[in-house]
Image (cartoon, grey):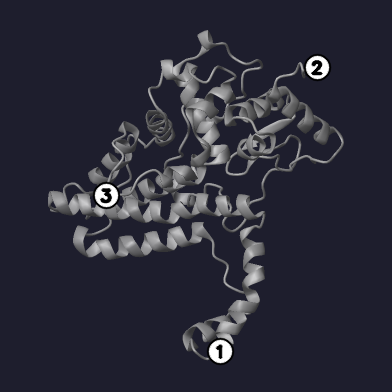
Amino acid sequence: MATDPDPPYRRIAADLRRRIATGALAPGERVPSNRRLAQEWGVALATATKALTVLRLEGLVEARARVGTVVAGGPTRPTGPGVAVPAVAPAAAAVAPVPAPPTAAAAHPAPDRAPAGDGELSRERIVRAALELADAEGLGSLSMRAVAGRLGVSAMSPYRYVTSKEELVMLAADAAFGEARYPADPPAGWRPRLELGARTLWALFRRHPWLAQLSPVTRPLLLPNLLVHAEWALAALDGHGLSAPAMLDIHVLLYSYIEGIAVNLEREDQARAATGVTEDQWMDRQLPVIGALADSGRFPVFGRLMADLPNGYDLDLDTLFEFGLANLLDGLASRVGPAAPAGP
């Protein structure tokens, strides 16, 4: 009996290549995920990932953050309400841009033009690949095997540099939190400093939504680069007569607020990927239910609000973040003191 000379990943890549060439998969259209390919072809996740890697190296597909792998050449993801694009208030952007260092994974450098041999691996390359994979397909897709497939190496090779998936996730998270830099000369007053720190973290969560899924606030991530953000916030509160527990409570409150809004970023991406329905499309389908509830008379305040919003309520996470931040800091003013130091 004749056997197929091509390994499974090549057959998968050939099928996707044919679908792209015939227009069955159009530019900008999302291609099946590595998990879906593994299920359809009955292969390991690493095999499916390797097939996508081959197409990416050929320039036929590209990974887009929080979208997944798409056919190359299509339009970029549009911005709009709820779309994961970092939004920093103009004042904050002017005071302290958040550049990525030259070696940061978020710079998303182009992949190597050929699969790497085991001897070319390094911890930095593995962490970079993990960061890109989590950005493109979410935290649930991140595994040692998937990273190995993305790099085109054997499944066990990454273990020579990283001991476990758990360590890999923490290394990738530390690299992501390390992309931000604060100014050497901070703005005057505790409030501008906390605003800058909050917007910096929000931009990082926007860029890497999976960061908000890592750990409950009761089990803090002990990452050096995350502690940089904590140090910035605590230094802003220092010298205002607050006790140590009060300073830590304020820091945890502010961080958990930012993370609590950000947790919805990846959840929305997961819902879109699972259903193929955008948030706007989903909401449009709920209009009859919303109208029935508003007109039922059981919820008079809700009904009045809906009547006052003929075009609906546009939930924008960036706007919600800024609204909540302002009110949170207003509430802290009675505990911390004036927003800026008193003049001479």
Mark 1: amino acid:
Ser
Residue identifier under label 1: 296
User: Distance from label 2 to label 1 (Cα)?
Assistant: 69 Å
Say whether residue 223 is visible. yes
User: Distance from label 1 to label 3 (Cα)?
Assistant: 41 Å
Which of the two labelled residues, at mark 2 and mark 3, occupies the earlier sequence position?
2
Which quadrant would residue 323 be assigned to in this image? bottom left
User: Distance from label 2 to label 3 (Cα)?
Assistant: 59 Å
Spot occupied by residue 254 in the image (x, y as percentages of width and height): 32, 54
State the residue in front, 41 or 299: 41
Q: Residues within 10 Å of mark 1 (few under 14, many from 20)?
A: few
Mark 2: amino acid:
Ala
Residue furthest to the front in view is 1
Which residue is at a point 58% across and 14% down the rendered structure image? 116
Which residue is at a point 46% across and 45% down the rendered structure image? 205
State the residue in front, 107 or 276: 276
Residue identifier under label 3: 218
Mark 3: amino acid:
Thr
Spot occupied by residue 308 in the image (x, y as percentages of width and height): 57, 83
Residue furthest to the bottom in view is 297
- Element class at badge 2: loop
Spot occupied by residue 34 in the image (x, y as percentages of width and height): 62, 35
78 relative to 219 in the view: left or right: right
Front label number (2 vs 3): 2
Residue identifier under label 2: 2
Which residue is at a point 58% across and 24% down the rendered structure image? 149
Residue 266, relative to residue 153: is it above or below?
Answer: below
Which residue is at a point 50% across and 58% down the rendered structure image? 317
19 relative to 267 in the view: left or right: right
Q: Residues within 10 Å of mark 2 (few under 14, many from 20)?
A: few
